[in-house]
Amino acid sequence: MSDDVELVLRSTRVITPGGTRAASVAVAAGKIVAVLPHEAEVPAGARLEDFGDDVLLPGLVDTHVHVNDPGRTEWEGFWTATRAAAAGGITTILDMPLNSLPPTTTVDHLRIKQDVARGKAHVDVGFWGGALPDNVKDLRPLHDAGVYGFKCFLSPSGVDEFPELDQEQLATSLAEITGFGGLMIVHAEDPHHLESAPQKNGPKYADFLASRPRDAENTAIENLIAQAKRLNARVHVLHLSSSDALPLIAAAKAEGVRITVESCPHYLTLTAEEVPDGASEFKCCPPIREAANQDLLWDALAAGTIDCIVSDHSPSTADLKTGDFATAWGGISSLQLGLPAIWTEARKRGHNLEEVTRWMSTAPAALAGLAAKGAIEAGRDADFAVLAPEETFTVDPAHLHHRNQVTAYAGKTLHGVVKSTWLRGTQIADHGTPTGPTGRLLERQN
């Protein structure tokens, strides 16, 4: 072991690209320099952190977070969102371009957001740009300024300053982005199916579910695949909810279409059957669907049709979560709870932590091109989460660090306690309590 090693992290269960094994992980200057046998000698002057049988896994990477800062900071902000991320074992987030004012749709707007985030980030933070009907000219400059890709909506976003793209506008933006090798990430719901679906106000979840039919997702994804195939564009489907779209996606991947797909903890751990009427903390778009649908999403994860799991953390103030599903803000806050929520369900279904690590760290890092993140191996950033997978806890909203303690997981008992979180070799959370902000602002490097 090299004399410049400053820190050694040791566990009987270290999740590496080659599998889970007893190991000592050597860290110098914020980087992993070696993964060594468990009983490797610790160099003089290096600090040893021995986690016993707790699992050491790479810090999670969450590429779908709405921080809403600046402009809607009463909903969320960089200080609170990144504290929640750190407490939940997440070491890197990518911020969505909308729900902040201004949205990240020009380089000037990106710089405003970076200035707000600087000094407040407890984890590393990167940024998506936005693709709007009128900002095609801004896409290349945003790409050159370091955004990781571009988000668009195919149906109304819910905020006036971020309008959706029609099919012609999608084709124009996709052609521009493909020309410079960029990535388009897509909220895929077809507006025509949404407009023709029954719309009822009130507290009944069944009415809300009927207002966001699977066909809206299926048609939008089918059209997106056709556009990606025609242009050889690289596209990513956000927050997949409809299992009916899975055969389309699997076939497109088999044909070589450059498409990746994410789903979210709420689609994989919560079901329509359990949502009480009036409980609009469960509202999100697309919606949480039935248990049988959820089973197929898990099958698709195992098969690789769905690539990754990210939060779509989309918070609001409590007053916007009214008991009327038609008018309540749609969004689930789960930054701090995603890992235990997914692990609780995954272990029931016979999946292991290596798979969870791939879905929640390695694959999201690969999606965004975060080459220094997503694995415990030499050369990567020394980002870690320490998890006690057999321990349980009951979700108390008062213990959550995001700004408004509204959560669909309140009262649920979950497996997996995050004991600590480490960013580039510095501990940033201890038993759910974040330390001071040490995160950096990231820019795309390739």
Image: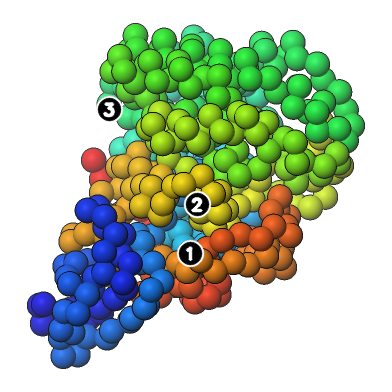
Q: CA distance from mark 2 to mark 1?
A: 10 Å
Say whether disc 3 or disc 1 marks the residue closer to the N-terminus: 3
Q: Amino acid at mark 2?
A: Arg
Residue 68 in picture, x, y percent from top left: 60, 48
Residue 35 in picture, x, y percent from top left: 19, 67
Whether tag 2 and tag 1 are in contact, CB under 8 A, the answer is: yes
Q: Circle 3 — which element?
A: loop
Q: Circle 1 — which element?
A: strand
Question: Residue at horizontal 68%, vertical 31%?
Answer: 290
Task: Look at mark 2 in the image and give the residue it sits on.
Answer: 347
Q: CA distance from mark 3 to mark 1?
A: 40 Å
Q: In the rendered view, how is the structure colored?
A: rainbow
Residue 128 in picture, x, y percent from top left: 44, 40
Q: Is residue 210 left or right of residue 44?
A: right
Q: CA distance from mark 2 to mark 3?
A: 38 Å
Q: Circle 2 — which element?
A: helix
Examine the rendering and report whether any part of residue 147 can be seen.
no
Q: Amino acid at mark 1?
A: Pro
The picture quadrant where one finds residue 23 is bottom left
| Mark 1 nearby-residue class (10 Å; few <14, some 14–19, many ≥20) | some
Residue 245: assigned label: none
Question: Residue at horizontal 21%, vertical 59%?
Answer: 377
Q: Is residue 236 left or right of residue 15?
A: right
Q: Is residue 301 above or below residue 390?
A: above
Residue sitting nearer the eye, 292 or 89:
292
Task: Look at mark 3 in the image and give the residue it sits on.
Answer: 181
Q: Is residue 144 left or right of residue 167?
A: left
Residue 389: assigned label: 1
Residue 423 in picture, x, y percent from top left: 37, 67
Q: Amino acid at mark 3?
A: Gly
Q: Residue furthest left?
A: 2
Camera-side mark, 3 or 1: 1
